[in-house]
Image (cartoon, grey):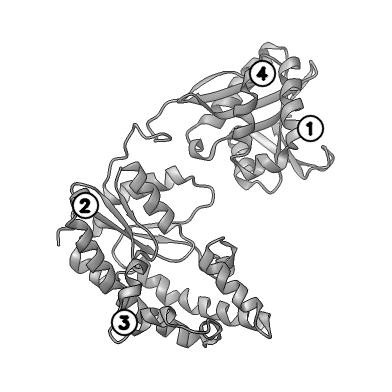
Amino acid sequence: MDLKNVYFIIGTSYAGKSTTVKNLAKRHNGIALEENYHDAKLPELDSREFPNLCYTRDLQDWHEFIRRTPEEYVTWLKNTKKECEIIELQMLEELLAKPEAQNKKIFVDTNIRIETLHRITDARHVLVMMAPPEDGINRFFDRPDVEKQFLYQLMMEEPDPQAALDNYREMLTLLHSKESYDELLNAGFPVIWRDENRTFDQTMDLADKAFGLAPDPKQEGGRHMEYTTRLVTIDDYDAIYELWNSTEQSRRALNPVDDAWEGIDRYLKRNPNTCFAAEADGRIVGVILTGHDGRRAIIHHLCVHPDWRRRGVAARLVSLAEDALKKEGIQKVFGLVFRDNDAANVFWEQQGYSLRTNLNYRNKSLNEAIPAGE
């Protein structure tokens, strides 16, 4: 089987494996084999040959599934993985024989074991994605996945729901043992750790580097795209509102009626020359809104779309606003940021600002970013 165009991702839960597979396939106009793609073969499997895979298929009462001991569950999962490997390799061989797969890159969220991957492909075609053990254990049921929410509801139906949850978390703890993490870290493949501050695009860049692939610069949001800056206008209402809704911090910072619409109008009427937007491919990807009283200015809102972070957009917008405010005769400039927004706090410090707590600004839990020396 010729696997020169096949790229495998393995790792821990909550590491973003299937999302990365899907996004890489989109970026490279390839094919994505996402999480548990072997399920497509499940209805036709013989339970005598694949007893562990067929266990859930033939299960009559799903409460039995969650009542097993953690040790029983882990043993079943390991045996299931061996059976998954057989099916996944068969499906991959079938796919590679199809005309539509010729010369296409194939990205696989796989159950194939480490020792098998070493035998069938080279190290540049396998990527390990990992999340901290506590994420896989404590955040397992935070996802909206149908399967995970189904299991959670089963536990809630148990006579002692908390005991059922504790039993399942003990199983997750065994799965996320130091031994299992060490096995992945020492597998001889590149490793990417989950980072909540990294965008999907940045994760794909890291995966491309690990696989030795060059990203397509024509793809929207690709790292080679350029952006321009300009003053914000009233006509940018809808675009800025859409941008604000792309990040959690911006959504909770603004009341859509009182702030988003009336606020933009207020900023632009009073400060038409000190509010800026960054624009790429015809859409606004960053914005900074300031307000001043002739003596001091406050940067009320600084927002950059997640796909455009860590490219210097925010720093460029701040620099533009500072220069424009100086031309207006403003000598003091302050920024406002949520105290629990660690990334934003670090950003302001990198721009030469210091932070002090401000508890009284519109009843929000904020820090005030003050230029060094003030």
Which element carries disc 2, helix, strand or loop? loop
Number of other residues with Cα within 10 Å of mark 1, as a class: few under 14, some 14 to 19, many 20 or more: few
Q: Is residue 372 visible?
A: no
First along the sequence among labels 1 and 2? 2
Q: Residue at x 20, y 62 (%)?
A: 94
Nearest the eye: 354 or 113 = 113
Horizontal and vertical percent position of residue 37: 35, 64
Q: Is residue 190 visible?
A: yes
Checking the image for residue 50, the label placed there is 3
What's the distance in space between the residues labelled 1 and 4, CA to CA? Answer: 16 Å
> Which three-letter amino acid code belongs to the residue tagged 3?
Phe
What's the distance in space between the residues labelled 1 and 2, CA to CA? Answer: 53 Å
Number of other residues with Cα within 10 Å of mark 4, as a class: few under 14, some 14 to 19, many 20 or more: few
What's the distance in space between the residues labelled 3 and 2, CA to CA? Answer: 29 Å
Disc 4 designates what residue? Answer: 234
Above or below — where is 135 with respect to 285?
below
Checking the image for residue 258, the label placed there is 1
